[in-house]
Image: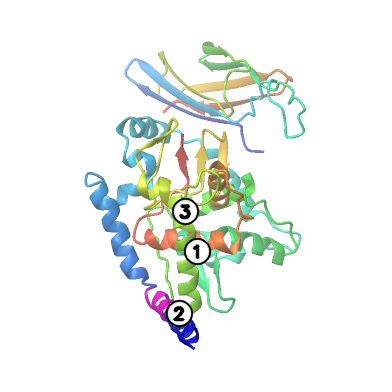
C-alpha cells in the first residue's frame, strides 16, 4: 500500500524547511452520517519528526484538525542527505511512518 | 374566414422563426463573442490565466493558491488514479487499454461528438463505458475513483490546449445549442442560471466564495475542493451547482449535462488543460 505520508524537506543555510501532507479521515466524532448516526472519532493524536536521533517537531492533534492535514515548519540544523523520519499515531492505535532524505 | 387566415399567418410566423433559429446556431460566432466578453470584462487578466478560475481575478487568493500548489491536496488522487488505470480487470484488460495512447495526454479531446451514436461522449462517460464493456462495476460519477482517474488523465495532459470539434452535423450543432440553452436557462427556487454566476458575476463574492469566470472553467477539472474535503468530478460540480440554486439536479452524465460540457469546453478551445485543480 502506498504511504499515507508525503514529505518534502529542504535545507538552506542553517535551517531546514519541512512540508508534509498526511492522508487521514480525521473524523471529529461530532459529525453524523446520512443515516443520522454519529461517525466515531478517528483522528491522529501525535505526529513526530526525527532527524539524527533527535525529535525536532511533535504535534498533538485532535478532532479540530482537518481531513488530510498539512503541516509546515522549519528547524535549525539538518543537512542535505540527512534522514528525516516522520511518524503518526491515531486514536485507534493505527500508525504509519516513513523516512525521507533532506534535500 | 378572416380568423382562418390569421391562424395560418401565425403558423407561418412560427415556422419562419423555427427556421431562423436553426440557421443561427453559429458556434464560431458564439466563441468570438464569449471570449470578447470576458476579455473586456477583465482586461487585466491574460487569456491563458482564465483557466485558473477565482485565482485569475483575486490577488489574495492567488497567493494562497501558489503556496498550496507546492504541496497540492490532489496529490493522493493522482497516485490512486494512476493505480486504478493500470489495475487489471477480471479479463486482464485495464482502463488504460480503452483509450487512445493508453489514456495519457488525451484530456483535451473530450468531450467529443460521436457521429455513430449521435451524442456527446465525455471523459467520465467513456471511463464508465470502458468498465461496463469489460464486465466491471462502473464508478460513481460523483465519487473519488472517477475523480482520481480523470485527475490523472488531466495531469498527463497539462498544457495541451482544449481541442473540441463540432462536426458539420445537425445533431452535433443541436447538442451544442442544447448545452448553451441549458447554461443560460434560469432554474431552481433561486432562479439562477449557470450564467447568472459565471458570466454575469465572476469575480464577485457569493457568501465567502469568489465566483470563477465561465471561460476556461472546465480546464482545471477535476478539482480538490477544501469545502468538500475531497475531490470532485465535473458531474459533481454540475449536480451540486444545481442543488445550490435549489433546483433538482439531473442524473450525472445526463445527455443535457454532457451537452453543457460540450458547450463550455468548446468555448475554452485553445486554452490549456491545467487539471486537476484545487479550489477553496
What label does residue A82 carry, if any?
A: none
Q: Residue at x 53, y 10 (%)?
A: A54
Q: Quadrant of residue A24?
A: top right
Q: Which of the chains bears the disc numbered 2?
A: B
Q: Are marks 2 and 1 in contact (CB under 8 Å)?
A: no
Give the side of residue B139 with respect to residue B104, left or right. right
First to last magenta residue range: B14-24
Q: Label 2: which residue?
A: B10
Q: Label 3: which residue?
A: B156
Residue B59: x and y in percent read 30, 33
Instruction: From the image, state whether disc 2 or disc 1 is nearer to you.
Output: 2
Q: Which of the chains bears the disc numbered 1?
A: B
Q: Main secondary structure of the magenta part?
A: helix
**First reached walking from the N terminus: tag 2 or tag 3:** 2
Q: Label 1: which residue?
A: B111
Q: Residue furthest bottom?
A: B1
Disc 1 is placed on an element classified as loop
Q: CA distance from mark 2 to mark 1?
A: 40 Å
Residue B32: x and y in percent read 29, 63
Camera-nearest residue between B137 and A18: B137
Q: Which of the chains bears the disc numbered 3?
A: B
Camera-nearest residue between A35 and A9: A35
Residue B48: x and y in percent read 30, 51
From the viewer's perspective, is residue A56 above or below residue B8? above
**Are both tags, 2 and 3, on one chain?**
yes
**First reached walking from the N terminus: tag 2 or tag 1:** 2
- How many residues crowd mark 3 within 10 Å: few (<14), some (14–19), many (20+)? many
Residue B122: x and y in percent read 54, 62
Amino acid at each position: 500500500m502506498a504511504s499515507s505520508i508525503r514529505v518534502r524537506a529542504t535545507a538552506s543555510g542553517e535551517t531546514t524547511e519541512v512540508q508534509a501532507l498526511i492522508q487521514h479521515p480525521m473524523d471529529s466524532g461530532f459529525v453524523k452520517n446520512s443515516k443520522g448516526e454519529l461517525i466515531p472519532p478517528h483522528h491522529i493524536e501525535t505526529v513526530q519528526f526525527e532527524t539524527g536521533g533527535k525529535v525536532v517537531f511533535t504535534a498533538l492533534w485532535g478532532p479540530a484538525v482537518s481531513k488530510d492535514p498539512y503541516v509546515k515548519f522549519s528547524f535549525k540544523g539538518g543537512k542535505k542527505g540527512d534522514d528525516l523520519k516522520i511518524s503518526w499515531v491515531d486514536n485507534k492505535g493505527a500508525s504509519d511512518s516513513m523516512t525521507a532524505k533532506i534535500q | 374566414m378572416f380568423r382562418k387566415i390569421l391562424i395560418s399567418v401565425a403558423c407561418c410566423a412560427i415556422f419562419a422563426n423555427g427556421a431562423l433559429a436553426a440557421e443561427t446556431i453559429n458556434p464560431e460566432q458564439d466563441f468570438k463573442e464569449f471570449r470578447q466578453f470576458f476579455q473586456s470584462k477583465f482586461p487585466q487578466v491574460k487569456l491563458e490565466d482564465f483557466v485558473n478560475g477565482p485565482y485569475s481575478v483575486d490577488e489574495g487568493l492567488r497567493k494562497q493558491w501558489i503556496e498550496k500548489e507546492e504541496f497540492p491536496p490532489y496529490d493522493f488522487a493522482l497516485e490512486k488514479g494512476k493505480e486504478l488505470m493500470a489495475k487489471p480487470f477480471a479479463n486482464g484488460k485495464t482502463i488504460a487499454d480503452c483509450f487512445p495512447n493508453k489514456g495519457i495526454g488525451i484530456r483535451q479531446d473530450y468531450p467529443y461528438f460521436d457521429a455513430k451514436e449521435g451524442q456527446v461522449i465525455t471523459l467520465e462517460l467513456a471511463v464508465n463505458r470502458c468498465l461496463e464493456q469489460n464486465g466491471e462495476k462502473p464508478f460513481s460519477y460523483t465519487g473519488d475513483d472517477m475523480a482520481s482517474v480523470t485527475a490523472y488523465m488531466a495531469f498527463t495532459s497539462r498544457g495541451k490546449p482544449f481541442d473540441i470539434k463540432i462536426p458539420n452535423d445537425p445533431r452535433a450543432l443541436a447538442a451544442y445549442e442544447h448545452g448553451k440553452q441549458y447554461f443560460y436557462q434560469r432554474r431552481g427556487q433561486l432562479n439562477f442560471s449557470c450564467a447568472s454566476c459565471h458570466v454575469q458575476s465572476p469575480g464577485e463574492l457569493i457568501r465567502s466564495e469568489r465566483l470563477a469566470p465561465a471561460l476556461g472553467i472546465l480546464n482545471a477539472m477535476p478539482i480538490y475542493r477544501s469545502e468538500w474535503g475531497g475531490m470532485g468530478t465535473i458531474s459533481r460540480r454540475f449536480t451540486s451547482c444545481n442543488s445550490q440554486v435549489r433546483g433538482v439536479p439531473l442524473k450525472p452524465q445526463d445527455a443535457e449535462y454532457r451537452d453543457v460540457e460540450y458547450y463550455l469546453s468548446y468555448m475554452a478551445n485553445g486554452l490549456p488543460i491545467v487539471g486537476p485543480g484545487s479550489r477553496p
